[in-house]
Image (tube, rainbow, N blue to C red):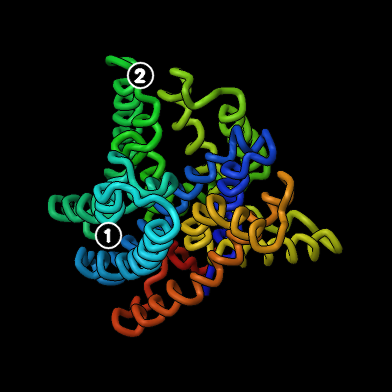
Amino acid sequence: MRNKRLDVLRSVAVVTVLLHHSGIWPFFTRTGWTGVDLFFVLSGFLISGLLFSEYKKRHAISFKRFLIRRGLKIYPAFYVFLFLTAVVELLVFHAHPLVQYLHEIFFLMDYKQGFWDHTWTLAVEEQFYIFLPLFLLVILRFSAKRENPFRIIPWAAFSIALFCVISRAASIYIGKPNFQMAYIAFHNRMDALFFGVLIGYLYHFRPAILEKLMRPTRNRMVMATISAVLLSFAYFYDRDNKFFATFGYSFIYLGFTGVLLLSLYVHGIFSGKLARLAELAGSAAAFVGKYSYSIYLWHGPSGAWLPGLVRRTTGFPTGRSGRFMVYFIGSLVIGTVMSKLVEYPILRLRDRIFPDSNIVPVAAEVGNAHDR
């Protein structure tokens, strides 16, 4: 059973990225890149939830099993995407250097130029999928607390946040400013994922803290306000601003951390017809969120190739709005179709061969969340 609220957040993340890359609306052109940070926070929360749930059930974490299940989630859809787009590139356009394909294959795109510009986020997440279980296994090795061996995680989150700020500052202030490295490199961006891990830890091992924090309506209003203020920095500062490149990414993932908590704990805001309308809108958004991984993959070639292909074959689109419609709808349709053809059949096969043993990353009272 999926968590509809988290699927809605996935939808928000992928749609804002699509709007950002479309260039159709100045607001999203300026701020839509933040959808990536929402994905990061969600991924950290969900992936850590899988590992924490496994530990609570078995008092152990299987690194091998985690990597196999994660690989079957990420690799088939990605490598099919990479193969098909490489074939099109070779047959129709000029081939990219071979080394760029190798960077994609080995998930090095956050440090080395890949074939597609948007896949660097997958490299950051893939590297984090290796780092996190190893980090938790080290904690288990040296912890004497069987029921809650992960008490160091809040301190680790603070330390990683501080490290990333210092590391981004080094990218900006030492030598020639490297804003691109501050934005995409794993060692500069892993703090967003780890704050998702912090929420996952509190949710699974210290739920009373979150319940106390999120129960009063006043606290929720304050959190919503603070989150909105933090996220607004993306509008008022460019990514090549030295202050923002150092501290701004921290503001953005902290803002989305608040959004995640609000989505988990706040419900029943609307009533009557408004509630029904919200339910319909939420269902539509959750549908998009369910297929967000493949939609994110395929929005790159959909934007680069699809409008031109449709225009040459049908004479439409001829204007900016028409190109946007073809790109946006095409991204959703192609991503959904490829998800159904590749991603979900492999996931069903995975779950038969490597069942999850009823391990879920989010407790029943909030809803069972399928990992991204």
Give the percent coordinates (x, y) of residue 160: 30, 35
Give the percent coordinates (x, y) of residue 48: 35, 56
Q: Which residue is mark 1?
A: 147
Q: Which residue is mark 2?
A: 177
Q: Amino acid at mark 2?
A: Pro
Q: Where does the C terminus fall, quadrant-wise? A: bottom left
Q: Residue furthest left?
A: 142
Position above or below: 309 against 18 = below
Position above or below: 239 against 264 = above
What is the C-alpha distance between the residues marked 1 and 2? 46 Å
Q: Residue at x 67, y 34 (%)?
A: 27
In the image, 73: left or right of 369?
left
- The answer to whether marks 1 and 2 mark residues whose Cβ atoms lie closer than 8 Å is no
Give the percent coordinates (x, y) of residue 307: 62, 54
| Mark 1 or mark 2, whichever is nearer to me | 2
Position above or below: 36 against 267 = above
Q: Residue at x 73, y 65 (%)?
A: 279
Residue 206 shows in the view: no
